């Protein structure tokens, strides 16, 4: 390489070093960065709490036996619609009919005893009156009169005892009839048979435990559905009666069932180390959706009233961490290292340039972020593209494009590469 050539290359390199920054600035600033903007405006901001749970019918009744007996007849099948008071099942009544016969006989014996003691009482009363007359004429001594008086009192006591025994026998007989009546299982509500686990010949037992024979059947009012949700203890303080809820059944994951919070449990349910509270939600009519009790579901519990407030798309808000230097006045620092203070800002397009504006935020949802300070309604907020938001510098020239124009430009760049 000749000295002349070397000198020329050195000069070109110097020019490149001097010119390149200005060229890049021109490309970045003067040419304009393609961005999409959206004016800050009033929007309904509805933050949500995520929860999970199951669907249930609004009214479900588990029928259990109140007496021990074998199932004699089952008059319905699972899926049948029944009316309140309808006979559903009969248990073997033989034992309880025998008890009625036994107690009926005991009551008759008690009545016979009362009749006999009434006759005895009448005899003692007449005898005592005669003794009183004879004693007045001094035809008998005072001892005989006292004996007749005591016999009269004893007859009265025996009659009273027999009368109470008869009342007891009548009460026992009433219990026997009541027990017999419990061998007929009737529908306590109108609804549909949704579970029928017992069979004819099996023994029904009065128990609330999960034992064979303890559960006869389940009747549900299938016209109304509820959702029983589990809300984490960290979120339950934000839930209140009447809040709006969208429930998404597992079988229809893209279909929302609208409802409202009806009841919030006061005591938690504990699963391992986690604590959650049961929240009951009444749901609107699901229409033709084929839903069943026990289906799993997820839910969005909406907080607040959803009132309109100044908001921007959530993707427009950028967070940065600014390092705050420690005090150098000799005071002991509050922390051993530099404190990181997160700051939020948005990019606003003003006169064709990007301006970085610090903002204060309020509640947010999946789409909107409420802004309480920093910008006003109508400000043209830059909302994308996302990679552009991260690379913008205050004062950069920008060119506003529509979403379709940005997409077309991206497609063109992709094809060129």
Image: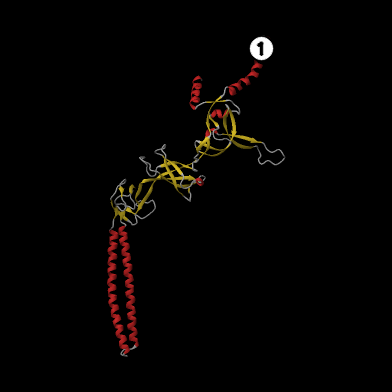
366 relative position to 166: left or right = right
The residue at 65%/16% (across/down) is 15
The residue at 33%/82% (across/down) is 149
Tag 1: Cα neighbours inside 10 Å, few (<14), some, or many (≥20)?
A: few
The residue at 33%/67% (across/down) is 168
246 relative position to 318: left or right = left
Task: Say above or below: 353 vs 151.
Answer: above
Residue extending furthest bottom? 138
**Image coordinates for residue 310, horizontal then vertical, percent:** 53, 37
Query: What residue is shown with label 1?
Result: 8
**Image coordinates for residue 355, horizontal then vertical, percent:** 59, 30
Describe the colour scheme in one phrase. Answer: secondary structure
205 relative position to 50: left or right = left
Q: Quadrant of the N terminus?
A: top right
Residue extending furthest right? 330
* SS label for mark 1: helix
Which of the 4 image quadrants contains residue 388?
top right
- Asked whether 378 or 406 is in front, the reply is 378
- Asked whether 316 or 69 is in front, the reply is 316
**Image coordinates for residue 83, horizontal then vertical, percent:** 31, 50
Q: How many marks?
A: 1
**Image coordinates for residue 26, horizontal then vertical, percent:** 60, 21
Task: Say above or below: 55 vs 28.
Answer: below
């Amino acid at each position: 390489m000749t000295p002349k050539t070397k000198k020329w290359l050195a000069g070109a390199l110097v020019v490149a070093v001097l010119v390149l920054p200005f060229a890049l600035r021109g490309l970045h600033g003067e040419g304009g960065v393609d961005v999409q903007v959206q004016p800050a405006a009033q929007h309904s901001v509805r933050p949500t709490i995520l929860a999970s749970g199951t669907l249930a019918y609004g009214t479900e009744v588990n029928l259990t036996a109140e007496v021990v007996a074998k199932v004699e007849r089952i008059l319905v099948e699972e899926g049948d619609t029944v009316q309140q008071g309808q006979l559903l099942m009969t248990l073997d009544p033989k034992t309880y009919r025998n008890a009625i016969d036994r107690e009926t006989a005991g009551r008759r014996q008690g009545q016979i005893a009362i009749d006999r003691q009434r006759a005895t009482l009448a005899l003692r009363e007449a005898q005592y009156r005669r003794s009183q007359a004879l004693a007045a004429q001094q035809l008998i001594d005072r001892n005989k009169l006292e004996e007749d008086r005591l016999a009269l009192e004893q007859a009265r006591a025996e009659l009273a005892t027999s009368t109470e025994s008869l009342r007891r026998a009548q009460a026992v007989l009433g219990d026997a009839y009541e027990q017999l009546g419990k061998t007929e299982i009737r529908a306590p509500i109108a609804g549909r048979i949704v579970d029928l686990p017992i069979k004819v010949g099996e023994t029904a037992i009065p128990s609330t435990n999960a034992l064979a024979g303890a559960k006869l059947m389940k009747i549900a009012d299938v016209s109304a559905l509820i959702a029983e949700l589990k809300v984490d203890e960290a979120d339950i303080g934000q839930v209140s009666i009447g809040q709006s809820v969208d429930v998404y059944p597992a079988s229809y994951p893209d279909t929302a069932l609208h409802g409202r919070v009806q009841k919030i449990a006061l005591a938690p349910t504990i699963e391992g180390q986690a604590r959650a509270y049961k929240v009951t939600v009444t749901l609107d009519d699901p229409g033709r959706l084929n839903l069943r009790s026990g289906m799993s579901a997820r839910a969005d519990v909406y907080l607040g009233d959803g009132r309109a407030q100044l908001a921007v798309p959530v993707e427009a808000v950028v967070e940065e961490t600014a390092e705050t230097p420690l005090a150098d006045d000799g005071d002991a620092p509050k922390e051993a290292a530099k404190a990181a203070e997160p700051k939020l800002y948005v990019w606003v397009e003003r006169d064709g340039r990007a301006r970085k504006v610090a903002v204060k935020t309020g509640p947010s949802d999946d789409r909107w972020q409420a802004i309480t300070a920093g910008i006003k309604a109508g400000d043209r907020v830059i909302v994308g593209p996302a990679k552009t938001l991260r690379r913008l510098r205050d004062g950069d020239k920008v060119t506003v494009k529509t979403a379709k124009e940005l997409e077309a430009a991206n497609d063109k760049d992709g094809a060129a590469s």
